[in-house]
Image: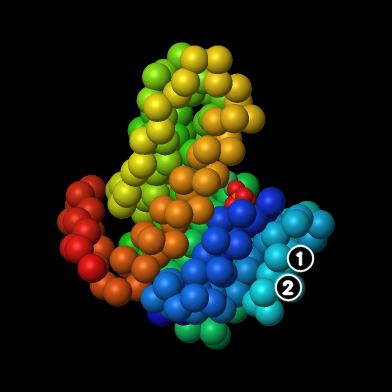
């Protein structure tokens, strides 16, 4: 399976996926990083890992559809079969969402459907929940709304700060995401309506 990872920031999940690929634990190859922030640390991570990067500046384009059409052409040229969103901070249009329906996944730092959107970790703490976690889901047209593939819970301890919880969430994500990508690559994930089933390895 040929994979493209989309990211805008630190890239800890990109790194975890790239490391898993090197260890032949991803079930596929990362063909491309797509990044909308030329200065993002994830771009340097791709360079060090020897992974090609398609880096762009959104304001150079007339519309989201315009850059997505270019991205789509590049993905098709490379035979990409799975898009993995890993901290990609841009809203996607139907250009990519429809072309990759059932073949695009995202990771979100809360137990969806609780706390979709930005600053999910802070939202959860401010709400005072006792349990939060991580969700991996297929991407549909909505905001963090697609069918759920996998979740991990984390108990929130008394006095936990946003920084502490963010660290623990990232650590959980960095384990769960490569595992989920592998399950997809091995054909063990199937989608029936909103329900996703996952066969054991
Ligand atoms: C992660 O917390 C992910 O859940 C969210 O963006 C963050 C990306 O972190 N969608 P990183 O860039 O992979 O370190």
201 over 73 or under it: above or below: above
What's the distance in space between the residues labelled 2 and 1, CA to CA?
6 Å
Cβ atoms at labels 2 and 1 below 8 Å apart: yes
Q: Nearer the viewer, residue 54 or 16?
A: 16
Q: Is residue 115 toward the left or the right of residue 193 in the image?
A: right
Q: Work out whether residue 98 can be spotted.
A: no
104 over 137 or under it: above or below: below
In the image, what residue occupies the spot 79% across and 60% down?
38
Q: Which residue is mark 1?
A: 44
Q: Is residue 14 toward the left or the right of residue 43 in the image?
A: left
Circle 2 Cα neighbour tier, 10 Å, few/some/many (<14 / 14–19 / ≥20): few
Q: Does the closest atom of ligand 1 sit within 8 Å of the Cβ of label 1?
A: no
Q: Which residue is mark 2?
A: 48
In the image, what residue occupies the spot 60% across and 22% down?
161
Q: Quadrant of the N terminus?
A: bottom left
111 over 75 or under it: above or below: above
Judging from the image, what secondary structure is the residue with disc 2 in?
A: helix
Q: Does the closest atom of ligand 1 sit within 8 Å of the Cβ of label 2?
A: no
Q: Nearer the viewer, residue 172 or 40?
A: 172
Judging from the image, what secondary structure is the residue with disc 1 in?
A: helix
């Amino acid at each position: 399976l040929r994979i493209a990872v989309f990211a805008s920031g630190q890239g800890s999940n990109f790194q975890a996926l790239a490391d898993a690929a090197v260890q032949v634990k991803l079930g596929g190859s990362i063909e491309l990083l797509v990044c909308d922030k030329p200065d993002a640390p994830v771009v340097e991570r791709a360079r060090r890992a020897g992974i090609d990067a398609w880096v762009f500046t959104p304001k150079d384009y007339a519309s989201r559809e315009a850059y997505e059409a270019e991205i789509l052409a590049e993905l098709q040229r490379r035979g990409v079969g799975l898009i993995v969103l890993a901290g990609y901070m841009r809203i996607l249009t139907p250009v990519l969402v429809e072309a990759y329906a059932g073949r695009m996944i995202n990771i979100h730092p809360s137990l969806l459907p609780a706390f979709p959107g930005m600053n999910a970790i802070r939202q959860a703490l401010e709400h005072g929940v006792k349990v939060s976690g991580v969700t991996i889901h297929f991407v549909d047209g909505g905001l963090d709304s697609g069918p759920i593939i996998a979740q991990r819970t984390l108990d929130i301890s008394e006095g936990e700060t946003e920084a502490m919880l963010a660290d623990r969430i990232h650590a959980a994500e960095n384990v769960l995401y490569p595992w989920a990508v592998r399950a997809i690559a091995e054909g063990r994930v199937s989608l029936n309506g909103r329900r996703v089933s996952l066969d054991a390895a």
